[in-house]
């Protein structure tokens, strides 16, 4: 009897671990784009850049037709790469975002474009000074 109970407890524990492993951390369905952005910002604020990127990418996946959040998420992901010291990757992502502005222009919110242009220019200047 004791052996059966112990086996049941182990199996239940393994089942719980498996269910947690397959679920995205804190990314349950039903969150609004704003709630996902808040979780992304909270992750970034505590230095958890990888989860910040995951949250922004998750928002883009969950709300592909939400142009404003999509563009802001693209900007934030590039900015996080800059914060992680991966400036080449940040510049690459800023280039992709700015190319989108060239195609879609006034249909997109202007602020991410302005911020991306300024930060990209600063990163490129810093890179030239190092060379």
Image: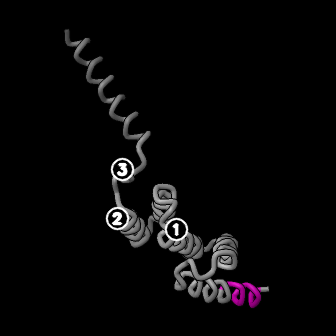
Residue assigned mark 3: 28
- The answer for how far apart the CA atoms under marks 1 and 3 are is 19 Å
Q: Report whether 25 appears left or right of 121.
A: left
Q: Residue 59: horizontal and vertical position, in percent?
A: 46, 60
Mark linked to residue 113: none
Up-down relation of residue 104 to residue 54 (above or below): below
Marks 2, 1: nearer the viewer: 1
- The answer for how far apart the CA atoms under marks 3 and 2 are is 11 Å
Quarter of the view holding residue 1: top left
Question: Which residues are the magenta region?
Answer: 123-130
Report crowding for label 2: few under 14, some 14 to 19, many 20 or more residues within 10 A (C-alpha).
Answer: some
Residue 126 on the magenta segment: yes
Report crowding for label 1: few under 14, some 14 to 19, many 20 or more residues within 10 A (C-alpha).
Answer: many
In contact (CB < 8 Å): disc 2 and disc 1: no
Marks 1, 3: nearer the viewer: 1
Q: Residue 82: horizontal and vertical position, in percent?
A: 59, 76
Quarter of the view holding residue 118: bottom right
Label 1's element?
Answer: helix
Q: In this rendering, does residue 13 appear at all? A: yes
Instruction: Looking at the picture, tell me which residue is in the foreground, 15 or 63.
Output: 63
Extreme front residue here?
Answer: 107
The earlier-in-sequence mark between 3 and 2 is 3
Q: Report whether 75 appears left or right of 126.
A: left
Residue assigned mark 2: 35
């Amino acid at each position: 009897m004791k052996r059966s109970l112990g086996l049941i407890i182990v199996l239940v524990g393994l089942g719980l671990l498996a269910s947690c492993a397959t679920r995205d951390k804190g990314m349950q369905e039903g969150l609004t784009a704003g709630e996902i952005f808040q979780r992304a910002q909270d992750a970034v604020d505590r230095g958890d850049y990888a989860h910040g990127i995951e949250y922004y990418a998750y928002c883009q996946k969950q709300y592909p037709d939400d142009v404003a959040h999509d563009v802001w998420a693209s900007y934030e992901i590039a900015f996080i790469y800059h914060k992680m010291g991966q400036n080449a990757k940040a510049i690459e992502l800023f280039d992709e975002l700015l190319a989108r502005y060239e195609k879609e222009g006034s249909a997109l919110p202007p602020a991410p474009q302005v911020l991306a242009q300024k930060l990209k220019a600063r990163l490129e200047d810093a890179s030239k000074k190092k060379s």
